[in-house]
Amino acid sequence: MGCPLFNPNNIISVSKPTLPFQIQAHLTRPSKNPPKNLRYPRRSKPPPPEEFDITTTTKTFKPSQILPNSDTQTELPDIGDTTNNSEWSKEELEAIASLFSRRTPPQRPTHHPRRERPLPLPHRIRPLKVPSPKPNHAKLAHRPSSLAHRVFKDPIFLIGLAREIRDLPLSSDASEVLDNWVQFLRKGSLALTIRELGTMGLPDRALQTLCWAQKHPHLFPDDRILSSAVEVLARTRRLKMSVEMEKFLNSASDGVVEAVARGFISGGDLRVARKLLLVAKDNGRSLDASIHVKLILAVASDPDKAKLVPALLDEMSEREELKLRQRDCMAVMKVCARLGRFEAVESLFGWLKESGEAITVVTYTMVIHSRWCEGRLREAMALVWEMEKEGLLLDLPAYRVVIRLFVGMNDLARAVRYFTKLKEAGFSPTYDVYRGLIRVYAEAGRVAKCKMVCREAEMAGFTLDKEVLALMLEMEGK
């Protein structure tokens, strides 16, 4: 397509001697075939838009906006002849000027939701410190200190020391073994070794180990080693301190005094242990409540000294702070129920509830048995419902106590129901359960059921006692 301002006919009409014009005409001559996009036009192109000069009243056209059709060649009119004398009114000019002077309204910026910044991390807000050099673990692995850090509290190593000391001849001292391992030991290391020697029945070797540790400043003084040694010596009755007990209490710590008391109780010297507790109480020393529990259990097992149990219970109740494990509490309840101190059982049970600790089935069973022994059957049955409400699974002792309770209440339906639950749980009924069930069936006058339970008990391997046989003969005679 040629330029609209250039007419090829005018160039061809120029004389031939003018060489530059001929070259220009040859260069600008349009091709015979138009390009593919203009060969078959779909529609004619729109006319050029008009431009208006606001400063003048005449309407003008620019020649550059006139696009001739590719099919027909049109000659451009002269620019001077294109002026139109039509005038615009003042109102039209103001309307057109207002269109061009109108400002486009600003677009609202799109606000993207801003994500909250995360909280500062501790390692980023921590003040800067001078970096410390990292240790070379490859070199430290060959040092004795790193090996000592792994060995000084290893129970296998410490028990092995006790066995090596045990294997020494009688004429040798324990220092012959301990000197080889002195660089690997720390404070508290030999406590387990001394306890192991006491378990082996070697109190002399334990004393030799304590004397050896006192010669090394990095091992002694240490209450853990001293407590283990005095407990072993007190248990084997090698510790004599009845005369200098006041002096001992003034210099020893609470842990050492408790270890001595445990040793005397385990060794069966209850008199010295009792005296030690009294002297500690007079000096204002508050020992652990577990010492009182151990002494109560040891005294209760001896019928000749059972009279001391109420006094020990009173001393324990006078303590300002009572810290007992539920296992120790249950053991004291058992002793109190056997001695008829039911108020102490209820007091300990109330303290357990107030402490917020979860009460186990064993504790419930103990309190139910205590109330059954006291004759408070309705209160005992309330504990059974409380235990079921908590969703606790009953064990065999709990089933035995509950069935005994319902037999005492002459409640046949509940006794049979719990007897069925006992079997469904996979437990084998004991002889007291069979005997209680026979008794409650006999009270209801159901002879056939009594014979069935007797037959089941005999098949389980039990032999009926004289009381059950007399009851069966009485029922058959009726």
Image (spheres, grey):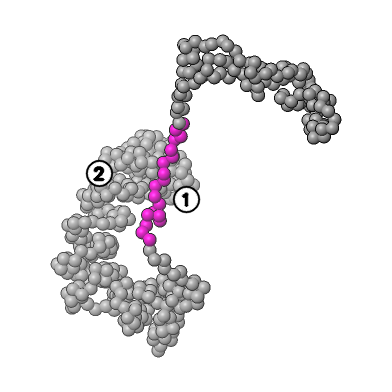
Q: Secondary structure at mark 1?
A: loop
Q: Main secondary structure of the magenta part?
A: loop
Q: Which residues are magenta?
A: 110-128
Would residue 16 be visible to someone looking at this image? Answer: yes
Residue drawn 65% across the image and 22% down it: 63
Quadrant, the N terminus: top right
Q: CA distance from mark 1 to mark 2?
A: 32 Å
Q: Tell me the kind of residue under disc 2.
A: Gly
Residue drawn 36% across the image and 59% down it: 127
Task: Judge left or right: residue 24 versus residue 204.
Answer: right
Task: Judge left or right: residue 37 versus residue 125.
Answer: right
Decide: few, some or many residues near mark 2? Use Cα within 10 Å; few <14, some 14-19, many ≥20: few
Q: Position of residue 102 (x, y in %)?
A: 46, 21
Residue in the foreground of this view, choosing between 352 and 309 = 352
> Which numbered disc, 1 or 2, marks the residue closer to the eye?
2
| Residue 295 vertical placement versus 124 (above, below) | below
Residue 413: image quadrant is top left
- Whichever of labels 1 and 2 marks the residue nearer the N terminus, that label is 2
Decide: few, some or many residues near mark 1? Use Cα within 10 Å; few <14, some 14-19, many ≥20: few
Residue drawn 41% across the image and 37% down it: 417
Disc ID at residue 461: 1
